[in-house]
Structure formats: structure tokens, C-alpha cells
Amino acid sequence: MTDEKIVRLTQTVKGAGCAAKLPPGDLDRALCGLDLPVDDNLIVGLERADDAGVYKVSADVALVQTLDFFPPMVDDPYSFGRIAAANALSDVYAMGGTPKTAMNIVAFPAKKLDISVLRAVVDGGLFTLRQAGVVLVGGHTVEDDELKYGLSVTGFIHPERILTKKTLRVGDKLLLTKRLGTGIVCTAIKAGMAGEAITGQVIESMMTLNREAALAMGDYTVSACTDITGFGFLGHLAEMVVDSGAGLRIDSAAVPVYPEALEWADMGLIPAGAYNNRAFRGEFVSFAPDVPQRIQDVLFDPQTSGGLLIVVSAAEAAALRGELLRRGVGAAAIVGEVVAEPQEKIMVE
Ligand code: CO
Ligand code: CO
Ligand code: CO
């Protein structure tokens, strides 16, 4: 070990807060009209814009595949590794799958950061993989100006038990399993404004696997599921309603949020990704006049390693929430419902 001075990881990243991804509209424009390979066994592919790809191997086994990586949104390298791994695994859980294997994706600025930082990041990732029962099978590291870390993850699923985004059943309830506002809080962390308590809470939430939530929903009549990440709560709901033949009604007062995020939203401490999300998906959303601006901002805030959004039959919603609470998913809340009209719209009340 060298005794190089401790570096605040978030200060080594140029972009602000959690939202380092390409604006969603730009990606659509780049990929639109490209000639995608076709295969009869591809059950969920790129054109569906779902959480993960699904490829059928046999009558009762399909592969679920996904990858995610990003620059650090927190200063502690070990925590960053745990967060990146929980985030990468989440898309498999959101499809109803069980993650099995993973590979590291690393970009490392060897001239700027001590190699012990890389070790701590990968060690954090390994901790989370052990929690998930996932085995690391390889990886790839390149030198870059900025640290980035994540994983490509492969899981298994029964081909008839895939939970996609758009299979909304009118009357079903929406359950959210983690609080919103991590993008805003990470922006405050980077700005040096977040105290220890809120920083610790948000890091703990981002490090928490969606595994318990996924195991819980396996026993209930769930019609659709996704995880809340970079597009924010309303951006991901917009993906659900498009071409679904249904709409959504959200009770904004019931949505779990970090109170600190609301205060920082009032001060304008909002990551650029939140504005991108609103610009890209705002047309699907109508806010009742009494929904405060700060709540609207948090509902578009890009999340890192956010919770699952579970669409469950109305009759079982309270029981599933109880099961989630028993499993330690303490923020779980019923936040809205699937409605027949207006189609392809989200009404936030
Ligand atoms: Co996802
Ligand atoms: Co993803
Ligand atoms: Co899904």
C-alpha cells in the first residue's frame, strides 16, 4: 500500500451526481432503424426496452442477461462496489429471474488513483455477489480518465414466468420497495452538503439487493415488474404504460421519499438527469394542481440501485406489502393502481 492521500471518489468524476447516462432520447435516435439480429428463441430483446434480455434455452430454462456500469456516486470505494453490483443484479430480479453468474466491467485511472481503490471496489462487488449467491466468472479492465465499475449478469428464469413491464392488468395495485431521492442526495454528497446520517441511509439503501423483494413477489399474483433506476420513477412508469393499453394513477403522498431530498429539491440541487427524464417522458404525465414542484422533481429523479415497482392484484397487495415488511423491505408502500382510462397516461394526484 502507498500512503497517497485519501481521494474523494466523487470529486474524480466530471458529471454531477448519479446520472452519468446518455440522455434517453439520444440513445433512441442512435439505435433507431438499425438492423437487429433475429432469433426465434429471443423472448425479450432490444425492441421491447425491458429490464433485461431473455433467451430461451429449453422448454423450462431461459437466460436473463443484463449489464450496468457507472462512475462512483459515493466516496467510499468498497460501498461503491457494493452499490454497482446491487444495481447490476437488479434487472434480473425485476424480470422475476435468479441471477447466477457475473463478469466485472472496470475502467480505472491508474495514474490518478491508488491501485488499492480498485481492490476495494472489486471486493465490494464480490461481497454483494456472495449475498446474491452469484459466482464471478471473469471480467475486463481498461485504463480510462475516470473510474467506472459494474457487471454483466446472467440469470435463469422459467420461460413462462417472465415479468415484463407492459403486462398491466386494470385494477392491480403498484408497490414500490425503496424510497426515492437518491439522485438528489448523491448530488448533495458530491457537493459536500449531505450529513453523515442521510449519506449512510442512502448508501445502505443503494447497497441493498432487490433479492428479498423478488423472492417475496414470487408467491403472489404479479402481472408486471420493473426496477426504478436512471429514468426515475415516472420515466420507468412511462415505459410501462406505452403500448400497454392501460394507464396509471399515482397517489404522490403515498410514495416513499427521503425528506432531505425534498429540501434539496426546493434549493434546486437536482441532477441534470431529472430534467432529461422530464423532457423525455413528461408528456405521459399529468400532475394534479396541488402536487408540489419538489414532489414532481423527486418523481423524475434518476435513481441508482432503486427499488422494484411491483404490479400485483388488488386483493393481494396488502398481503404482499406485509410479506415485504417481514423480509426487511421496510420502505415498501402501495403507491397507485392500474386504470383503464386514460390509456398510456400517468395521473399523479
Ligand atoms: Co431495469
Ligand atoms: Co439497467
Ligand atoms: Co420486469
Image (spheres, helix red, strand yellow):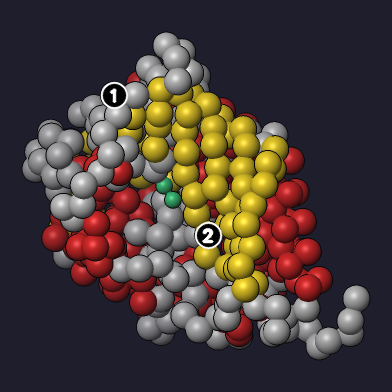
Name which residue lies at 29% across and 56% down.
Answer: 235
Q: Indicate whether 307 appears above or below 6.
A: above
Q: Which residue is mark 1?
A: 40
In the rendered image, which quarter is residue 50 located in? top left
Name which residue lies at 67% across and 75% down.
Answer: 75
Horizontal side, residue 154 vs residue 338: left or right: right
Q: Indicate whether 120 appears above or below 139.
A: below
Q: For the residue carrying disc 1, how many other residues have a C-alpha within 10 Å: few (<14), some (14-19), or many (20+)?
A: few
Q: For the residues carrying marks 2 and 1, which lies nearer the camera in this image?
A: 1
| 300 vs 116, nearest the viewer | 116
Name which residue lies at 21% across and 47% down.
Answer: 35
**Mark carried by residue 69:** 2
Q: Indicate whether 335 appears above or below 97.
A: below
* Quadrant position of the N terminus in the picture: bottom right
Q: CA distance from mark 2 to mark 1?
A: 29 Å
How far from the left and from the top, in percent, is residue 98?
Answer: 56, 30
In the rendered image, which quarter is residue 324 located in? top right
Residue type pointed to by label 2: Phe
Q: For the residue carrying disc 2, how many other residues have a C-alpha within 10 Å: few (<14), some (14-19), or many (20+)?
A: many
